[in-house]
Image (cartoon, coloured by chain):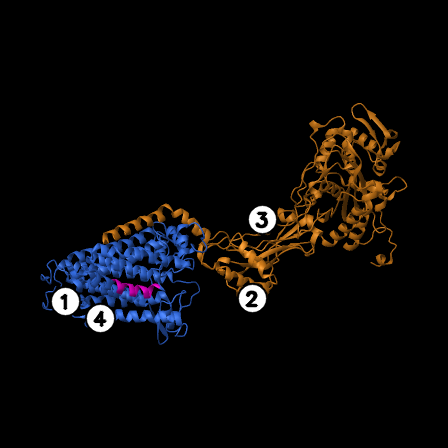
Chain colours: A orange, B blue
């Protein structure tokens, strides 16, 4: 009989061997799943505007959660729910069913962002605990949506700066694996993965106030003209700082779910389009730079009907008929034929090289995700039409950002400008770790005289000479001399040849003061409703917006009026 | 039938070398087991953020066990010096301490039952309500109180009493009505008192009693006839309690209800299984931090498995096997029927408990609260078991190759 017991003991040894040798891996795995690890989340870095106004911040919030396993059986859960309902001001039956239906019996999140008293009260209940988490908030709401972007719930950047600088902002979390007791208190360290580092802060070049002006003006126009979308961007041409950047329709980054995905992207860098007349000054600059034309040259504009076997037929916008035009008049009146002839004069190689130098067909390097490089076809793919069409803005796709950069180069006296959005990186003590301003690029794209002449003579004329056919007269200001160029481009049909009727992109790119440009503004409104009878051209739709933006921005910046110092206040200064 | 009496009182000298080796080996094995137990109870009772207040050291199982370990050794030594013949009924009923102790334990059991049904004592007083059962007596002693389980005492006294009674009756045991039935009634009485509050211990006692009667040479049909009755009683005992049904259903479906009914066996398997061959290292286990309930008492074997792995578990089981084998030597070498039966009962009780406990912990058997002898925390059980082993050592010491007392042939 006792021998049977001995055999039983041997059997138990075998059983132990089975458990501990053959099933060891299985149980070790369960043991790890079940027993260990704690993770510390870093605080995501804040994002500021250039004046250190908060654009995005992660706030510490206390979440109340329940561990139904620790609470006990159903009766205990009921009791706990009743206690919790008074703490959280939620019906006990809701809490109870939430706990019971939870997929993970050991973790049911009951309440987010609880107040201190709620936390203290909740912690007294067995099986209920408080957990610290971070919640990303965007105090400016949709104002900065397309620049700042937003994050997922688990602290990953999904758009904008949040995505581009995700790694820096996120910081490093420490996934310290702990052995924990049944109440999740750590016992001792098992392994340490990484050191907890809060994310760094980022200071942008954007000024929330300017952004506010721009958004206000743009939205007004966007609504008035029932447009499909609209965008505007303001930059400092000397440094390349982006001061404001608005794309409407936008969304609320605090609650991005449910937004039309089309509105999530920053159209200024992700959308390419044929720029139309906006590109004319750039092409002219190339032609002048290369000596293909002279400033005082006259070009015969064929009375509005230019035809050739190799390049087809070219007409003017609104079927104007121009005769002999000077170079500046071509720009002021926005003659397509004049531009086509200019293209022919310089030849395709010069045109291609020049556009390349101005940065078309290449990324601008702005710190935003999803930037596209536009389309500047290589010379080998150019047709006979190309050299006549590209000079007035077709057969080339650009982004607004590229266009803005080109005008910044003009406004900067022909010097290369690299636009940028991130000014500095600061650590969590508020000290600047890294200035992000790109090295001032060296080199002239065009001669300063050419740039100066274009701005002060041709482009100022676009704004000033209303009676002489200047298309941008609506942007004219009293205090500062504005220069600019309109653009009204047809929209190519998708998947088909030709262009859509009655729909276009109305743009205006401008800067002020002309003598020493402080800002360059680009406004572009897509598909304004021409049937409203208010016009749908760049001059009619976009230029007034640009004018108002310039006025408000320069006033805000405290720039002394340079033109017609009528006002007493300005004189005193 | 008479014993050959009054040989010169057995001296403390060993009769021969072999007996001495066996006796010493048993002592060594038991001390080893108790040492392992003390270490692991101390390890398992670790807790986070616990500040030890030495004024109340008795409240900490780990420290209590450290105190009980030498005490148990002392008791074992003392009992090994007491001639085991004292427990026989040779000198009459009234001179036998077993009879008194059995009576005391029966009275205590009755007291506990009274408390259960009528609550005559204040709650948490003399008879506290612990783990949903009335199983304990609490004797306040100054700043701390000693807890004591009367059913443990009753268990051992039953074993001793059956051995003594059977020895007294001799061959008369074969008489059904005169001898066998009274013994059964006595066992039934003890069992009945225990079964109300502690089904496991009651079942264990009856099983041991049953096996002892077989060893004593009771006629087989005597034994077999009450078995259907016992079977029916056993069945009803299980069916009458929802807890027991649940436990058995849970055991059948081990993969279900892992966070409720099967939590404990599942955690036990995780603890043992994750230990691997060599374990996580002494004191490095995790299960003891609240994951495995009853870690320092019934489920101490899992903690050993987790921290010392297969090696530790095998060592413990091998010690028990060695204990049983040495016990078999003692029984073979002992020519005295009373000593033989008593030794058999003691070994059977200890080995049976060990096997059942390890079976429960490794989830070969459904969950039942049986402590692992010598190893699990628990003062009553440890001291009483140590006393029983002391008796066993005494039997081993005086078992000789040549019979000490010839049995005279009876008429």
Specify few, some or many for label 1: CA neighbours under 10 Å numbering under 14, 14-19, or 20 or more. Answer: few
Q: Observer-nearest residue: A253 or A402?
A: A253
Residues under labels 4 and 3: Cα distance?
80 Å
Pointer 1 chain: B
Q: Disc 4 versus disc 2: distance between alpha carbons?
A: 59 Å
Label 2–label 1 contact, CB within 8 A: no
Read off the residue under disc 2: A121
The residue depicted at 80 percent of the width and 30 percent of the height is A340
* Chain identity of mark 2: A
The segment highlighted magenta reads B184-195
Measured from the top left, where is residue A26 in percent x and y?
A: 41, 47
Membership of A404 in magenta stretch: no
In terms of depth relative to the viewer, which is nearer, A446 or B133?
B133
Task: Specify whether B406 is left or right of B57.
Answer: left
Left/right placement of residue A531 relative to residue A34 reads right
Q: Tell which residue pokes out farthest to the bottom in this image.
A: B142
Quadrant for the C terminus of chain B in the image? bottom left
Residue displayed at 88% across by 30% down: A303
For the residue pair A562 and A99, the one nearer the viewer reads as A99
- Badge 3 element: helix
Q: Nearer the viewer, mark 3 or mark 1?
A: 1
- The residue sitting at the top extreme is A309
On the image, the x and y values in percent for residue A156 come to 59, 49
Percent of width and height locating residue A515: 81, 47
| In the depicted structure, whether residue B9 falls above or below residue A292 | below
- Mark 2 is surrounded, within 10 Å at the Cα level, by few (under 14), some (14 to 19) or many (20 or more) other residues, namely some
Q: What distance separates the C-alpha of mark 3 from that of mark 1? A: 82 Å
Of badges 4 and 1, the one in the foreground is 4
Q: Are marks 3 and 1 in contact (CB under 8 Å)?
A: no
């Amino acid at each position: 009989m006792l021998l049977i017991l001995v055999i039983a003991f041997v059997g138990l040894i075998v059983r132990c061997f089975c458990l501990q040798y053959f099933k060891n891996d299985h149980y070790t795995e369960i043991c790890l799943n079940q027993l260990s690890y704690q993770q510390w989340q870093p605080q995501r870095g804040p994002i500021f505007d250039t004046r250190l106004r908060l654009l995005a911040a992660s706030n510490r919030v206390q979440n109340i959660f329940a561990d139904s396993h620790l609470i006990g059986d159903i009766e205990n859960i009921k009791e706990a729910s009743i206690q919790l309902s008074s703490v959280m001001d939620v019906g006990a039956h809701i809490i109870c069913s939430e706990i019971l239906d939870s997929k993970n019996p050991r973790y049911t999140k009951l309440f987010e962002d609880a107040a201190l008293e709620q936390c203290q009260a909740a912690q007294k209940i067995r099986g209920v605990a408080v957990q610290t988490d971070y919640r990303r908030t965007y105090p400016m709401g949709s104002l900065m949506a397309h620049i700042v972007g937003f994050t997922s719930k688990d602290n990953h950047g999904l758009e904008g700066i949040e995505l581009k600088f995700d790694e820096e902002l996120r910081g490093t979390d420490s996934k310290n694996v702990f052995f924990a007791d049944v109440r999740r208190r750590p016992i001792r360290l098992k392994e340490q993965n990484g050191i907890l580092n809060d994310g760094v802060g980022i200071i942008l070049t954007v000024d929330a106030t300017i952004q506010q002006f721009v958004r206000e003006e743009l939205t007004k126009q966007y609504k008035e003209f029932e447009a499909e979308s609209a965008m505007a961007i303001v930059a400092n041409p000397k440094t390349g700082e982006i001061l404001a950047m608005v794309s409407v329709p936008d969304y609320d980054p605090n609650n991005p779910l449910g937004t039309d995905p089309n509105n999530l992207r920053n159209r200024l860098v992700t959308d390419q389009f044929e720029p139309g007349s906006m590109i004319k000054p750039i092409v002219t600059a190339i032609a002048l730079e290369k000596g293909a034309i002279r400033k005082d040259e006259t070009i015969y504009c064929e009375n509005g009907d230019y035809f050739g076997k190799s390049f087809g037929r070219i007409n003017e916008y609104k079927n104007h008929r121009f005769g002999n035009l000077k170079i500046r008049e071509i720009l002021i009146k926005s003659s397509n034929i004049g531009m086509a002839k200019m293209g022919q004069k310089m030849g395709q190689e010069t045109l291609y090289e020049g556009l390349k130098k101005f940065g078309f067909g290449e990324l601008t390097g702005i710190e935003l995700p999803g930037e596209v490089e536009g389309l500047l076809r290589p010379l080998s793919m150019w047709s006979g039409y190309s050299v006549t069409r590209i000079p007035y803005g077709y057969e080339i796709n650009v982004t607004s950002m590229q266009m803005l950069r080109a005008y910044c180069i003009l406004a900067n006296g022909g010097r290369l400008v690299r636009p940028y959005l991130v000014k500095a990186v600061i650590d969590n003590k508020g000290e600047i770790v890294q200035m992000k301003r790109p090295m001032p690029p060296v080199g002239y794209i065009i001669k300063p005289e050419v740039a100066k002449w274009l701005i002060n003579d041709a482009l100022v004329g676009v704004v000033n000479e209303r009676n002489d056919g200047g298309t941008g007269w609506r942007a004219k200001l009293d205090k500062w001399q504005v220069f600019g160029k309109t653009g009204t481009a047809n929209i190519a049909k998708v998947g088909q040849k030709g262009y859509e009727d009655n729909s276009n992109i109305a743009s205006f790119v401008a800067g002020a003061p002309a003598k020493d440009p402080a800002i360059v503004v680009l406004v572009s409104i897509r598909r304004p409703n021409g049937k409203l009878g208010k016009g749908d051209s760049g001059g009619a739709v976009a230029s007034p917006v640009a004018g108002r933006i310039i006025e408000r921005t320069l006033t805000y910046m405290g720039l002394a009026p340079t033109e017609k110092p009528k006002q007493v206040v300005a004189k005193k200064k | 039938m008479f014993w050959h009496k009054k040989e010169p009182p057995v001296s403390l000298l060993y009769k021969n070398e072999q007996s001495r080796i066996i006796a010493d080996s048993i002592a060594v094995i038991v001390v080893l087991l108790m040492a392992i137990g003390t270490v692991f109870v101390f390890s398992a009772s670790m807790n986070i953020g616990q500040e030890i207040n030495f004024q109340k050291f008795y409240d900490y199982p780990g420290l209590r066990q450290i105190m009980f370990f030498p005490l148990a050794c002392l008791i074992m030594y003392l009992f090994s010096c007491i001639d085991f013949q004292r427990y026989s009924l040779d000198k009459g009923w009234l001179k036998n301490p077993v009879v008194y102790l059995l009576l005391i334990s029966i009275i205590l059991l009755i007291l506990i039952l009274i408390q259960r049904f009528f609550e005559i004592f204040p709650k948490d007083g003399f008879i506290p309500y612990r783990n949903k059962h009335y199983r304990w007596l609490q004797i306040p002693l100054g700043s701390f109180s000693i807890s004591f389980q009367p059913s443990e005492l009753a268990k051992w006294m039953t074993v001793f009493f059956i051995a003594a009674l059977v020895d007294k009756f001799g061959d008369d045991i074969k008489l059904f009505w005169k001898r066998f039935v009274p013994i059964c009634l006595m066992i039934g009485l003890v069992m009945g008192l225990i079964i109300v509050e502690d089904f496991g211990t009651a079942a264990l006692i009856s099983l041991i009693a049953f096996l002892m009667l077989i060893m004593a040479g009771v006629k087989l049909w005597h034994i077999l006839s009450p078995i259907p009755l016992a079977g029916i009683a056993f069945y009803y005992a299980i069916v009458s309690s929802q807890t027991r049904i649940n436990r058995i259903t849970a055991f059948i479906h081990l993969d279900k209800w892992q966070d409720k009914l099967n939590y404990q066996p599942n955690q036990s398997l995780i603890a043992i299984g994750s230990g691997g061959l060599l374990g996580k290292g002494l004191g490095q286990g995790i299960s003891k931090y609240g994951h495995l309930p009853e870690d320092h008492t019934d489920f101490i074997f899992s903690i050993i498995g987790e921290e010392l792995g297969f090696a530790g578990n095998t060592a413990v089981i091998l010690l028990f096997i060695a204990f049983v084998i040495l016990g078999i030597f003692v029984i073979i070498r002992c020519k005295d029927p009373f000593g033989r039966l008593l030794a058999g009962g003691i070994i059977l009780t200890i080995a049976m408990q060990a096997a059942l406990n390890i079976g429960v912990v490794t989830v070969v058997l459904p969950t039942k609260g049986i402590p692992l002898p010598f190893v699990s925390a628990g003062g009553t059980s440890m001291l009483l078991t140590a006393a029983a082993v002391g008796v066993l050592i005494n039997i081993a010491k005086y078992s000789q190759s040549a019979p000490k007392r010839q049995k005279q042939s009876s008429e």
